[in-house]
Amino acid sequence: MILSEKNMGISASPTLAIDAKYKAMLAEGIDVVGFGTGEPDFDTPNNIKKAAIEAIEKGYTKYTPASGILALKKAVCEKFKRENGLDYGPSQIVISNGAKHSLVNTFDAILNPGDEVIIPAPYWVSYPEMVKLADGVPVEVQATEEDGFKVTVAQLKSVLSDRTKAIVINSPSNPTGMIYSAKELMEIADFAVENDLFVVSDEIYEHLIYSEGEGHVSIASFGEEIKKRTIVINGVSKSYAMTGWRIGYAAATPEIANVMSNIQSHAASNPSSISQYAAIEALEGPQDSVEQMRLAFKERREYMVNRINSIEGVSCLMPDGAFYVMMNISALKGKTIQGKVINSSDDFCDILLEKALIALVPGSGFGADDFVRWSYAASMEKIRSGLDRLEKFLAK
Ligand code: PMP
Ligand code: GLU
């Protein structure tokens, strides 16, 4: 039987695949250290867990409206107002099964077959596949390490065509940790307005910023013109250590939100009722755990970057946000390490996993083959051990 040609061409998520491989090795009793998936190692804060237990006890265990309960949508609107200076009403909010699902709904809602979506690389692994799932065409623009992994409007212009429909902006970025300044975002916003494009702004790492300065700015906050063409994506996974609860959300015009909600009503109904109540507590309850986690990530970031830059053959930039480091391995390409020629980031990660028992994600899936990604959402002990192993391995 012939399967769907479009979907047979969709690759598995490499971040999730590496995490699964790492966990399978652990289960076999192999002493591997994993930095594959970007997932806070902290437990979900207690006040949030309690809210979920209470929801179960109160019997909030049934279907909810597909796009989420009103109380959570209101909490999301409050959050946008308080933290981003953005005014939305509940009819503009769609709650989904993680920000990943919010993004899939977004591309499904805005794309027609052949529509092009500009994706600055290095990009999070899932964007191009999501665009393809929605019959769109991902168009990559490469941001270099020399440019701090940021694309310029001139680069965006160079790939503009009459099929360009949207741009993806992910600041702070997975996998590079870079942050666009308000000025840079404003230029991108002007470009989007001038060329009648949608902006898909994935702001899931907004609370994880370490550099001093203006902090997080949403591109949607520069006025009505850009706001109405921006779909803001966010969620509780990263900020509140809630990756397993699967709650993400999108804010858009009522028209876009309605299409997204209709799609979701057939594909998934509502996200978990219990998780929705927990997410209200995450957004409305005490925020001190967010800051505690941020400070811990900041310390780990500095340790990791300093150690990497002290090891011969590899290097990295100091990321401003999120919890990833892109380690440059271009100096190792073409070299033979323990009998294997390193031709790609995949080769490097394979040999590192096999011989040094370190799980990292190859840059190939992020559109950046000269790099491999570390996540520092792991304990200091693990980070120390991983870097010790790398140092020993490369010294051989
Ligand atoms: N966007 C980015 C940039 C991410 O790194 C992730 C992490 N998985 C997501 C969206 C999706 O997060 P989730 O589905 O867990 O809410
Ligand atoms: N976003 C995280 C990562 O990049 C989690 C895994 C995933 O959803 O891709 O590792």
Image (cartoon, helix red, strand yellow):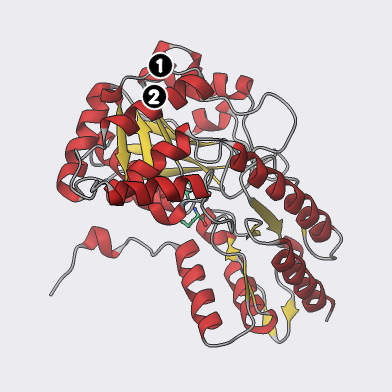
Which residue lies under the disc numbered 2?
Answer: 77
The quadrant in which residue 393 appears is bottom right
Q: Does the CB distance between marks 1 and 2 fall below 8 Å?
A: yes
Q: In this view, does 246 lie above or below 313?
A: above
Which label's residue is closer to the chain start, 1 or 2? 2
Return the x and y of residue 377 as percentages of the image width and height. Answer: 62, 56
Which structural element holds mark 2?
helix
Q: Measure the alpha-carbon separation of dots 1 and 2.
A: 7 Å
Return the x and y of residue 89 as percentages of the image width and height. Answer: 32, 19
Return the x and y of residue 323 as percentages of the image width and height. Answer: 63, 50
Tell me the residue at 69%/39% (across/down): 320
Number of other residues with Cα within 10 Å of mark 1, as a class: few under 14, some 14 to 19, many 20 or more: some
Q: Which of 216 and 339 is in front in this view?
A: 216
Decide if residue 97 is in sight here.
Answer: no
Q: In this view, does 239 lie above or below 159?
A: below
Amino acid marked by disc 2: Cys
Amino acid marked by disc 1: Asp
* Residue at far top of view: 224
Return the x and y of residue 196 as percentages of the image width and height. Answer: 36, 20
Decide if residue 176 is in sight here.
Answer: yes
Which residue lies under the disc numbered 1?
Answer: 87
Which quadrant is the C terminus positioned in?
bottom right
Which quadrant is the N terminus positioned in?
bottom left
Q: Nearer the viewer, residue 298 or 287?
A: 287
Left-right relation of 393 to 16: right
